[in-house]
Amino acid sequence: MNLIDLKDIYKTYFLGEIQVPVLKGVTLQVGRGELVALMGVSGSGKSTLISDILYKSVAQHLFRARERAGEHDAITGLDHLDKVIDVNQAPIGRTPRSNPATYTGLFTPIRELFAHVPEARIRGYQAGRFSFNVKGGRCEACQGAGIEQIEMHFLPDVYVPCEVCKGKRYNREALEFHYKGKNISEVLEMTVEEALAFFENVPAIANRLQTLHDVGLGYIHLGQSSTTLS
C-alpha cells in the first residue's frame, strides 16, 4: 500500500471568516492496480485533493458530470480509467423505515414471492399487501414502523416497540401467509447469511444477497434500520 502524506504541503487562506485550504506545489502520482492511502492532519487538504479535484475531474471526463472540479493544473492518465465510484460517509438511510432490504432492492422480489404463495393468490393479494409502508398489510397503530416514538422534554426521544404488533410491523392478516414456514416479518428478521441459504433457489433474491455476503455484510439483518448501520 502506498502512503502519501499531505502534512506541511498546504497553506490556509482567510477569506473573511472562511478558512480555505489551498494545496501548493503538490504532484500526486497514483499507480494503477494499487491501493493508495492518502493521509495527513485534519485540514491538510485530503478531501480537497481527492473529492473536489481528482474525483470530480474523472467524473467529468468519463460521465460528463456537471460538478466543477477544484482548480488544478492538469491531470493525465484518465484514458486508462473506465469508471469512478465515490464511497463517502453519507448515511444510506435517514429514517428508521429504511433498511438493507429496501435499500438494495431486495424487498420488491421478496414481497412478490409472498404474493405468489397459493393462499395469497386465492385472496387476490398483490405485492403491496406485504409492504409496511402502505395501508393494507401494515400495522396501522404504528403505521408499519414497528416502533412508537415517545417525546421526552429536555432529553432525546425514546423509541419503544409497538404495543399492537410487538415490533412486527404487520397486521395479523399479513402474518398469516408463509413461504417455507416463514412469514414476511420473520424474513426481515433474518441475517443476510441466513436469508442466502433460505432463498438460494430464488436468483432474483439470492444474487443480491450474495453480493452483500461477499463484501462482509452477512451479519446484518434484512429489516435492520439503516440508521443503526455505520
Image: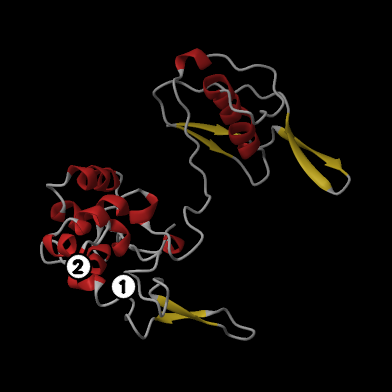
Q: Earlier in the sequence, mark 1 or mark 2?
A: 1
Badge number at residue 170: 1
Taking the image as shown, residue 174 lies to the left or right of residue 51, namely: left
162 is higher (above) or lower (below) than 96? below
Q: Whole-percent x and y of residue 101?
A: 33, 55
Label 1 – label 2 distance at C-alpha: 10 Å
SS type, badge 1? loop
> Which residue is at a point 43% across and 64% down the rendered structure image?
97
Given residues 51 and 140, the one toward you in this image is: 140
Tell me which colouring the rendered structure shows.
secondary structure
Q: Are marks 1 and 2 in contact (CB under 8 Å)?
A: yes
Q: Amino acid at mark 2?
A: Asn
Local crowd size for mark 2, using a 10 Å CA cut-off: few (<14), some (14–19), many (≥20): some
The image quarter containing residue 50 is top right
> Which residue is at a point 28% across and 57% down the rendered structure image?
127
The image quarter containing residue 98 is bottom left
> Which residue is at a point 45% across and 25% down the rendered structure image?
83
Given residues 114 and 23, the one toward you in this image is: 114
For the N terminus, the image quarter is top left
Given residues 124 and 8, the one toward you in this image is: 124
Q: Whole-percent x and y of residue 14?
A: 85, 42
Q: Whole-percent x and y of residue 183?
A: 19, 67
Number of callouts in the render? 2
Badge number at residue 183: 2
For the C terminus, the image quarter is bottom left
Given residues 197 and 216, the one toward you in this image is: 197
